[in-house]
Each structure stands twice: as C-alpha cells, then as structure tokens.
Image: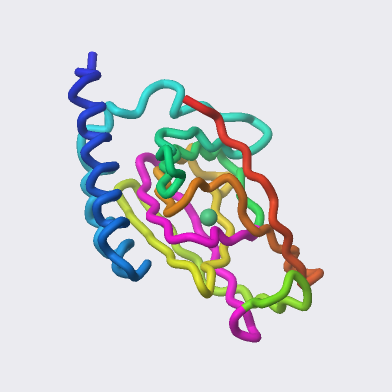
Amino acid sequence: MPDTAQSDHALAGFIGECRRIADSVHDAADIVGAIAPLMMRLVHGDRSFLRAEHFRSNPDHYTRNAIHISDDESLSLYALVWLPGQWTPVHDHGSWGVVGVVQGILEERSYMAADGEIRSDCGIRLKRGGVILLDHGSVTTFVPNPDHIHMTGVAADRERVVSLHLYGRNMNSFHVYDVAAGTRKLIDVPHQKS
Ligand SMILES: [Fe+2]
C-alpha cells in the first residue's frame, strides 16, 4: 500500500513549486521552461499520488480527471485517460501548459495559422504541421498568444495512455476549430472531479 500522506506530500510539493514559479516569473515561455523538469521528475518518480479515480476512462471519449484546481483558478492539473482511438478535436488552450506522459504513447498533431495571429472566429486558415509521439516519461509544453493549435490522442492500434496536464488557469473551456470551415468556437470542457 502506498503511504498516502507521503504521496500527497509529493503532489503538494509539485503544485507548490509550480505556483511559486507561476507567481514569480512573467513570461509564459520561462514558466513552462522552469516547470518542464519538475513535470519530468513527477512522471518518472513515485506516482502513488495517482489514485483509482484518476484512471477513470470512458468508452465513448477520452476522460479528464481533475487532480488539483487551485482556489483562485490560476493553476489546474488533470490526469487524462485515453483509450485506443480516442482523440481531442482540434483545439487551443489560451494558456501555457505542461504535459507529462505516465503510461503509453501519446500523439500530438500540430496545426499552424497560415495567416498569422488569429483575431476572429471565422476566416481561419489552418495548415497541418508535424506530429510528435510522446512515450512514457516524455514532457512537452506550449504557450499562448499565438496559441498552440493541436489535436491529441492515441492511435487505435496502441495501448491506453495516461498523461498529466498542468495549465496556467482552470481549463474549463477552450477553442475548438473546424478546419474545413475555417471557424472556431469556445466550448465548455467537462471533467471528472476527484
Ligand atoms: Fe491540448
């Protein structure tokens, strides 16, 4: 049995360090640069802070299990569980983010705004960019303005993925893009509470 107090202490330490960085560093690129090695340490270390409810999945769509949402909503951490063949829509976050893979191979497909910074919800031309495969222990980051536009998921012939996602706000909404129509809209994003 994991020592619950000790594992909760590890999580609290990670959140505390991230908060200190986010509160004291101005530039989002510097924030994710400072947090990335902390996330790597977290996903390589004792992960017993992850409880059964953080591994919940749904056969119909990927599942966002909330681990921590700070009282002032300036930080949020989720365990995302992806069954084979489950993907997000094309989206952005309007925030910085740091992602670490706990289990499996997570795939991220990038999109680029062909006309520079997006200032409207229509007339958006997106070009497909590269693909990155994130194996267990890998960490990736992104910053807003311009937003990192992407879709994330797991190929149908791969195993289940569990990944940790830390954001610089309560990630309860994001833009979803219709690439063919050249539009985007802000949607609410549900999550499972602990
Ligand atoms: Fe994302």
Name the residue nearer the viewer: 56 or 117.
117
Residue projecting furthest to the bottom: 115
Residue 194 as seen in the image, left or right of residue 178? left
Start-end of magenta stretch: 90-117
31 in the magenta segment? no
On the image, the x and y values in percent for residue 113 come to 62, 78
Residue 80 as seen in the image, left or right of residue 47? right
* Position of 129 relative to 187 (above/below): below
User: Which residue does the image show at 63% across and 44% down from the upper left?
Assistant: 189
Image quadrant assignment for residue 14: top left
* Position of 51 relative to 25 (above/below): above
Residue projecting furthest to the top: 1
Name the residue nearer the viewer: 164 or 96.
96
Name the residue nearer the viewer: 174 or 113.
174
On the image, the x and y values in percent for residue 68 come to 40, 35
Residue 121 as seen in the image, left or right of residue 192? right
- Name the quarter where the N terminus is drawn: top left
User: Which residue does the image show at 53% across and 48% down from the upper left?
Assistant: 171
* Position of 128 relative to 172 (above/below): below
102 in the magenta segment? yes
> In this view of the protein, can residue 180 be seen by the observer?
yes
> In this view of the protein, can residue 162 be seen by the observer?
no
Image quadrant assignment for residue 6: top left
Residue 42 as seen in the image, left or right of residue 173? left
* Position of 49 relative to 159 (above/below): above
Residue projecting furthest to the right: 181
